[in-house]
Image (cartoon, rainbow, N blue to C red):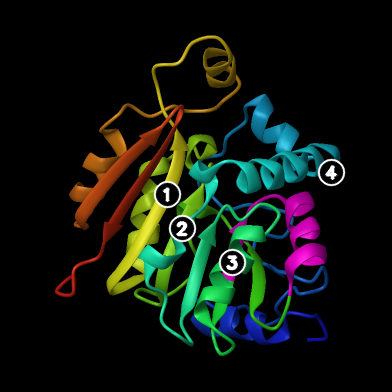
Amino acid sequence: MDTASNRALSTALDLLRDPPAKPDLGKGYLDLLGAGSGEAPKNSGFIQKAWASPVGSMLYDHAQLLNRRLLTAFHPPIDWLGIPSGGVALDVGSGPGNVTAALARAAGLDGVALGVDISEAMLERAVKAEASRQVGFVRADAQQLPFRDETFDAAVSLAVLQLVPDAEAALSEMVRVLKPGRRMAIMVPTAGHGGPMRFLSRGGARFFAEDELGDIFEELGLVGVRTKTLGFLQWVRGQKPLDAR
């Protein structure tokens, strides 16, 4: 394993439920999908196809980086997550990897952050931009996370769930891999907006009602659930109870 993120990818392999006999690390990330992508439902809308292309991922990368720098709404609540020194954090739908890297910095020099994405083009950009001994990337499906139960100290997902066919399954998976007492936060577009939002919806994106995700968080057993809507974006936070076992 001669990638820049060898330590982080070693951590990823250690956390897998079913580690492959011959891990595919040839592109700088751990590819658990190969030519196929499992049996989980797939988003076939034009938006997902566009982001999955090399040009689309580049455009998305630049737009996302600009938005996350300029808009407070895009900033993950790093302090609130309370990632312990030496902890392991998860970024579902990691895109260009800048949020994954921020999680790694919060975890300290002995910590690790893993970014999961399904787009090969996006993962290639993330590896070039952010891979390190603390930051690693995994190609996997958010609806079927490959990790063992209760292995992460924090989990986030920014502007991704609207493109996942079974968002409830993805959220359930994030809760499953989260350690008891630890926190997760997601950011998604909200419903109730016309024009471009209706256009994006026809392209395969889902827009959530005001209380929809908060209710799902509580149904999944999270406590202290909080929602905050900023314009057309919504943050939802929650904590896995200590007695979740």
Residue 5 pos. (x, y %)? 73, 80
Q: Would residue 132 be counted in the magenta stretch?
A: no
Q: Relative to the observer, which residue lies in front, 112 or 102?
A: 102
Please give the label number shown on residue 156.
2
Please give the label number shown on residue 102.
3
Q: Residues within 10 Å of mark 3 (few under 14, many from 20)?
A: some
Of label 2 and label 1, which has the lower sequence position? Answer: 2
Q: Mark 2–mark 1 contact, CB under 8 Å?
A: yes
Kind of residue at disc 2:
Val
What whole-number distance in Å separates the C-alpha atoms at marks 1 and 4?
Answer: 26 Å
Q: Mark 2–mark 3 contact, CB under 8 Å?
A: no
What whole-number distance in Å separates the C-alpha atoms at marks 4 and 2?
Answer: 24 Å
Kind of residue at disc 1:
Ile
Q: Is residue 190 left or right of residue 100?
A: left
What whole-number distance in Å separates the C-alpha atoms at marks 4 and 3?
Answer: 24 Å
Residue 132 can be seen, yes or no:
yes
The residue at which mark 1 appears reads as 186
